[in-house]
Image (cartoon, helix red, strand yellow):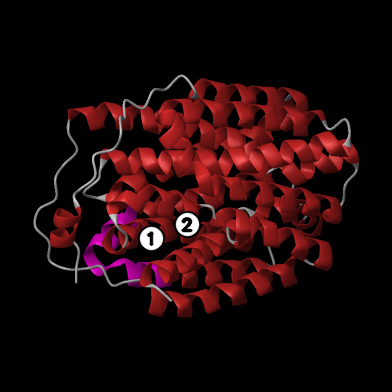
Amino acid sequence: MSRGFSLGATGFGLIAICYGFARFAFGLFLPQIEADLVLPDAVGGLIAGGSFLGYCLAIVLAAQLTERVGARAVAVCAALVAALGMLGIALAPSVAWLAGAVLVAGMSTGLASPPMAAAVAAVIEPCRWDTTNTLINAGTSAGVILCGPVALLLGAEWRLAYAVFACSALALALFACFCVPETASSRSPVAKAGPLSSVTLKRLVVASLLMGAASTALWSFGSQIVAQLLGWESAGAGLLWVVIGAAGIVGAGAGSLIARLGVDWANRLCLGALVAAIVLVGMGSTPAWTLLGGALFGAAYISLSGIYLVWGVAAFPERPATGLTIAFLSIAIGQTLGAPVFGLLMSQLGMDHALWLFALLALAAGTMRSSVAEAARPSPVSRAEKSPR
């Protein structure tokens, strides 16, 4: 097995567990959790936002830690933190405990992505960075896909589901120990982003923040929406999650989409799909339209996160972990703010108004231009000089 393949597979699995299980599964099980712990919609939204807040806190630290202690240590830490947070959710006896455990679980996602970007830069040839990074990023879909069958099998047993998730995170920590390279080393000073990158990054922050906020309409409240509109219980919501995750595998091709259309048009196309997804699920007229909306949402969200990953790395080709951090931190800030706001709007204005307002946020993100031409990559020689042996 080649080193690149084992790294890609491990990164895919780490992202699947941290994003699919530790972060996005909460929206799937939220109706059952609210029923057991007697949570109103607004409180559920605040707790869901805590997952994204944990991400924000961790991803800033992760970029620095990756450069100091190396990708392997941070990747293993991400898996262990995911296990701790999900075990805490499984054992949560109160709202306060649950909120703290959700925040810890959310931190694992912030720790997972930067070390994988740095590991890819150290092991993979520059011409394959975009393809490999977007493939690893699509691991979110695999995690979401697996959440669905768990919900179908266990029904309302969300505590048992999170215990299973925690065990899988512990197993992944072992794989990371062997497959993720130790990238920490003394390096020559890295190049800073130029004037173009500063403009690019400002627009990236706005676009990814708006997209992240819009996505919480379904990530955090998708189960509640289909429960209210179609009367679906945990089994139906689990099916929706399977469809979202399966369609999200399309996001693995975000690198190829960017190569064909460029960052700007790829971004607009996927944002249009995200808007259509929110509207279709929000209409909830028939199961078929709802599942079609779920499929569009999965494909659009994973593709967009891959697009913003490439956008950020292109602005910081010498510091891929930092470029990724800026992109994903902005998405998470939007999600941190979006989840409680959507819950409040839904309780005050109704579901329809909340959904349309959040669809407009996704449209607004499409007005941002990347200013990124074909990203300037370090040559293989320069990469070899900068990467640890």
Q: Is residue 182 left or right of residue 105?
A: left
Looking at the rendering, in which quadrant would you find the N terminus? bottom left
Q: Position of residue 373 (x, y in %)?
A: 30, 30
Along the viewing direction, whichever of 320 and 34 lies nearer the viewer = 320
Q: Nearer the viewer, mark 2 or mark 1?
A: 2
**Residue 99 can be seen, yes or no:** no
Which label number is shown at residue 116? 1
Q: Position of residue 191 (x, y in %)?
A: 14, 45
Q: Amino acid at mark 2?
A: Ile
The span picked out in magenta is: 60-76
Q: Is residue 32 left or right of residue 7?
A: right
Q: Earlier in the sequence, mark 2 or mark 1?
A: 1
Can you name the residue that lies furthest to the left here? Answer: 188
Q: Is residue 312 above or below residue 132?
A: above
Residue depicted at 17% across the width and 68% down the height:
185
Mark 2 lies on residue = 136
Distance from Cα at disc 2 to Cα at disc 1: 8 Å
Which label number is shown at residue 231? none
* Discs 2, 1 touching: Cβ within 8 Å: yes
Dividing the picture into quarters, in which one does residue 155 lie? bottom right
Q: Residues within 10 Å of mark 2 (few under 14, many from 20)?
A: many
Q: Amino acid at mark 1?
A: Met
Residue 61 lies in the magenta-colored region: yes
